[in-house]
Image (cartoon, grey):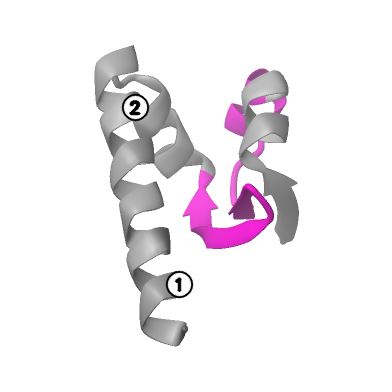
Amino acid sequence: MTEILTAEEIASNVNRVLDTPSTRFEVFYHNKYVKSLSNEEIAEIMRCSKEEVAEMEADYLRRLRSNDEQVN
């Protein structure tokens, strides 16, 4: 089963997400597709510190900007 969620929806429904085995979550962030994650992968991210999550977000945004610049 696949479910489409934004990063914000995952954050606000984290218990339901983590308790949904055998589901892939198609994750979007700022209306851009990020990747397909399992609930185990989401749980691993949720165990990260706020600083680690902030660095992941900054890295993702840098990649988006780089990709946008390559397209333009």
- Tell me whether circle 1 and circle 2 mark residues in contact (CB < 8 Å): no
Q: Quadrant of residue 46?
A: top left
Under mark 2, the amino acid is Val
Quick one: which residue is furthest to the bottom in this view?
71
Q: Position of residue 30 (x, y in %)?
A: 63, 47
- 15 left or right of 59 in image: right
Q: Which residues are magenta?
A: 14-38
| 20 up-or-down from 60: above or below | above
Q: Say which of 30 and 50 sits in front.
A: 30
Q: CA distance from mark 1 to mark 2?
A: 22 Å
Q: Which mark is residue 68?
A: 1
Residue name at image x 47 percent, y 37 percent: 42
Q: Element at badge 1?
A: helix
Q: Which mark is residue 53?
A: 2
Residue name at image x 34 percent, y 19 percent: 47
The stretch drawn in magenta includes residue 31: yes
Q: Element at badge 2?
A: helix
Residue name at image x 35 percent, y 31 percent: 44
| 21 up-or-down from 10: above or below | below
Which comes before the other along the chain, label 1 or label 2? 2
- 22 left or right of 48 in image: right
Residue name at image x 26 percent, y 17 percent: 51
Q: Quadrant of the N terminus?
A: bottom right
The stretch drawn in magenta includes residue 18: yes
Q: Position of residue 31 (x, y in %)?
A: 69, 55
Quick one: which residue is furthest to the front in this view?
72
Q: Say which of 35 and 24 sits in front.
A: 35
